[in-house]
Image (cartoon, coloured by chain):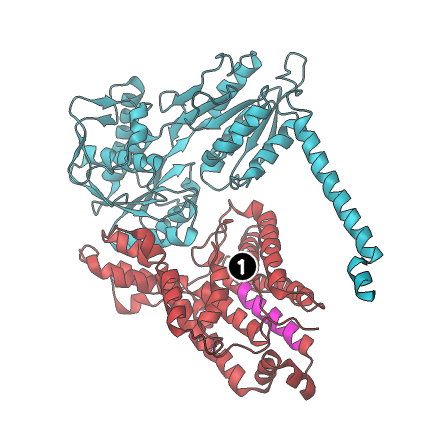
């Protein structure tokens, strides 16, 4: 009898606790469900006609002042924040997980953002696609060329190709090196990184056809200790100019400066970090693209109906990338040469991928007579290192 | 040219240099954790403490020289001190929380990782961009050789030397001093220590705080010596690895030293090999330390006995 009672008996406190917990859980899930479900699609479209400011949301994957990818975007955002009638909302250090969806959602729901710029590559699928489905009246502009047929039409893409900048930086490097050996610290052997390595060596070889460049892949986008180790190992090998493509080139540039060697930056202007050894670098000028977008959006244009181009892609000519100011180690002749090369890219008389191009195993990758413009989708398939690079992608 | 002929010698030199440059954070954190675990508590939160130390050292070094008018020679040292104090504060929180009744120290440790990194990121935002004065290093290389690679390899930070001296000192402390024996007694058999009249709570509190102080100094090394800058990814898991090192080192400070040197050097294997043109399978080289650790653990473990040297009360919940 008593054992039977014991099985049935649940202490009153436990019952109350359990009920409270269930109620709280139910309440939170209900509420969360409500906010995402019921208000979908009710958000105002760009309300500049009614005099309301245009609210634009920016999401970054890291810190806004990392001397790298995020800083380049944040600088662009600052440029449009100065424009009249534009309100900027930003959030930094948002991981490429479901969290970015919540960040975008709160920008739309709470701040009334009608345009969102999720700036990290990994945000796109599924996060941006999912949000674009839920908010068809909000325009999303993602920094990539990932949009495909069948995806929500309120997503636009924009991208800047850096091959030309890297080519010029490579030329500057080849003219500034004393040992005749170049180095490159790279994150992962993926297409954009490989293209930057190739651009750099092709530029260098257009000045000195025999020059070689040692590449070190650190294996990840942001591993400061490995990046410093890689820079030191390259310096130990007598390499005196180092190019870089990692998320934040700060550590590489600083380490190169400490070792007394030259460096060529990427993403943003790092000249302040290496007052002696910084040569130049390819920097993004996202402000240019962002300004163009703001003008179009204010004119009532939309990416969904084709009023705004689906993929805005550009390079030196469009002003989407720029060369960072030259450091003191760059000679006047080299500066003139770099400016002349820039001019050739702008007027189209020079193209980076002009055949014949061999990879570093001697195989012909771009046959003679073939040229690929930087925006050519064919270049998105490049998975080989150009002749002169010591390293392998596998 | 001398540097041109270096070639293959770059690999052992690179690993040696990497060992001298990169092992200090492991050393400080693992010595700190060794002290903590000897008293019978685990502090997984040292990853957070490391980040706090790195951030506060960098911030103080920068503020000291830029805003408070200190000389750039003095402000990094103040940064190191503040990093230690920040570590102590983190340690106090952990020590207090983890000694509450029925509280699991591993769970608190994980909470402290998140708390420490969160606070460090929050307070560290304004210091990502500026450059702080760095700690000076002792240029041993110039005594021996004119080779620039060797000179840079033999730039040794005084902090690293302090760490080197600390390991035997701690060993001596555990084996030959009265307080050291108290720590071990508390860790091995809290009941016996209680019978001796030693306050378990006080000993553990002091050990955790002292251990976190060391971890804070390790953080200062990251941001003020090598790689020498403050970013949110500066520790990249080194704090957690150092905690694991202590088990690897069987709770012996001298072996902590060897293990730290080993892990510090292992970080540079991948880059050093790639620099001379061995580029096949660099992911494997980068994973070498973990692979070797696993191998050593498998070779030395035995199903018949517990790990030798493990403090008896480690992992038990007291009170």
Q: Is residue A383 visible?
A: yes
Q: Colour of chain B?
A: red
Q: Position of residue B39 (x, y in %)?
A: 59, 76
User: Can you say whether A338 is above or below B62 in the image?
Assistant: above
Q: Is residue B68 visible?
A: no
Front residue of B277 and B290: B290
**Residue drawn at the location 77% of the way across and 43% of the way down:** A23
**The disc numbered 1 marks a residue on which chain?**
B
Q: Secondary structure at mark 1?
A: helix
Left or right of residue A50: residue A145: left
**Residue drawn at the location 25% of the way across and 61% of the way down:** B147
Locate the N terminus of chain B and report the quarter of the image it occupies. bottom left
- Note the chain letter of the cyan one: A
User: Does the magenta portion include B40?
Assistant: no
Left or right of residue A191: residue A64: right
What type of secondary structure mainly makes up the magenta span? helix
Residue at the extreme front: A1
**Residue drawn at the location 32% of the way across and 24% of the way down:** A377
Left or right of residue A207: residue B307: right
Q: Which residue is mark 1?
A: B47
Front residue of A14 and A248: A14
């Amino acid at each position: 009898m008593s054992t039977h009672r014991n099985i049935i008996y649940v202490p009153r406190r436990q019952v109350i606790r359990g009920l409270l917990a269930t109620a709280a859980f139910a309440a939170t899930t209900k509420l969360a469900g409500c906010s995402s479900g019921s208000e979908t699609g009710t958000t105002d479209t760009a309300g500049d006609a009614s005099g309301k400011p245009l609210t634009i949301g920016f999401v970054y994957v890291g810190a806004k002042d990392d001397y790298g990818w995020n800083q380049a975007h944040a600088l662009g955002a600052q440029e449009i924040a100065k424009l009249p009638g534009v309100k900027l909302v930003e959030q930094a250090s948002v991981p490429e997980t479901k969290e970015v969806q919540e960040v975008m959602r709160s920008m739309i729901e709470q701040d009334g953002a009608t345009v969102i710029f999720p700036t990290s590559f990994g945000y796109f699928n599924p996060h941006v696609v999912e949000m674009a489905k839920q908010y068809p009246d909000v325009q999303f502009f993602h920094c990539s060329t990932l949009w495909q047929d069948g995806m929500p039409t309120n997503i636009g893409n924009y991208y800047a190709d850096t091959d030309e900048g890297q080519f010029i930086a490579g030329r500057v490097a080849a003219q500034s090196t004393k040992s005749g050996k170049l180095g490159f610290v790279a994150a992962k052997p993926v297409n954009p990184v490989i293209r930057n390595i190739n651009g750099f060596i092709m530029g260098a070889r257009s000045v000195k056809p025999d020059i070689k460049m040692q590449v070190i892949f650190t294996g990840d986008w942001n591993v400061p200790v490995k990046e410093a180790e890689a820079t030191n190992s390259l310096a130990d090998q007598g390499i005196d100019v180092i190019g870089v493509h990692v998320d934040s080139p700060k550590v590489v540039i600083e380490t190169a400066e400490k070792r007394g060697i030259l460096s060529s930056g990427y993403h943003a202007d790092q000249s302040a970090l290496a007052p002696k050894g910084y040569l130049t670098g390819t920097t993004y000028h996202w402000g240019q693209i962002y300004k163009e977008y703001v003008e179009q959006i204010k004119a009532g244009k939309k990416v969904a109906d084709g009023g705004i181009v689906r993929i805005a892609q550009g390079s030196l000519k469009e002003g989407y990338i720029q060369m960072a100011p030259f450091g003191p180690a760059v000679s006047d002749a080299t500066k003139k040469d770099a400016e002349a090369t820039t001019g050739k890219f702008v007027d189209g008389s020079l193209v980076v991928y002009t055949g014949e191009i061999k990879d570093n195993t001697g195989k012909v990758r771009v046959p003679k007579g073939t040229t690929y413009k930087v925006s050519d989708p064919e270049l998105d398939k490049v998975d080989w290192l150009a002749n002169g690079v010591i390293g392998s992608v596998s | 040219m001398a540097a041109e002929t270096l070639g293959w010698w770059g690999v052992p030199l690179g690993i040696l240099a990497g060992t001298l440059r990169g092992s200090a954070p492991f050393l400080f954190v693992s010595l700190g954790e060794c002290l903590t675990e000897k008293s019978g508590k685990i502090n997984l939160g040292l990853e957070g403490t490391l980040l706090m130390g790195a951030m506060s050292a960098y911030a103080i070094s920068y503020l000291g020289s830029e805003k408070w008018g200190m000389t750039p020679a003095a402000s990094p040292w103040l940064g190191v001190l503040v990093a230690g104090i920040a570590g102590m504060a983190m340690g106090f929180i952990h020590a207090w929380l983890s000694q509450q009744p029925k509280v699991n120290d591993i769970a608190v440790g994980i909470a402290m990782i998140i708390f420490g990194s969160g606070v460090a990121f929050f307070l560290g935002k304004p210091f990502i961009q500026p450059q702080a004065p760095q700690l000076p290093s002792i240029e041993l290389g110039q005594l021996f050789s004119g080779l620039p690679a060797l000179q840079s390899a033999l730039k040794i930070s005084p902090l690293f030397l302090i760490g080197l001296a600390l390991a035997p000192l701690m060993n001596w402390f555990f084996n030959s001093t009265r307080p050291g024996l108290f720590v071990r007694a508390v860790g091995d058999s809290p009941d016996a220590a209680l019978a001796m009249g030693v306050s378990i709570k006080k000993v553990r509190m002091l050990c955790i705080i002292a251990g976190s102080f060391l971890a804070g100094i390790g953080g200062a090394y990251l941001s003020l010596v090598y790689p020498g800058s403050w970013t949110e990814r500066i520790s990249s898991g080194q704090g957690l690895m150092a905690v694991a090192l202590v088990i690897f080192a069987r709770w012996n400070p001298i072996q902590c030293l060897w293990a730290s040197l080993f892990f510090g050097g292992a970080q540079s294997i991948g880059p050093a090999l790639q620099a001379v043109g061995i580029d096949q399978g660099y992911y494997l080289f980068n994973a070498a330390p973990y692979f070797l650790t696993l191998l050593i653990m498998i070779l030395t473990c035995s199903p018949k006995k517990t790990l030798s040297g493990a403090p008896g009360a480690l992992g038990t919940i007291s009170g």
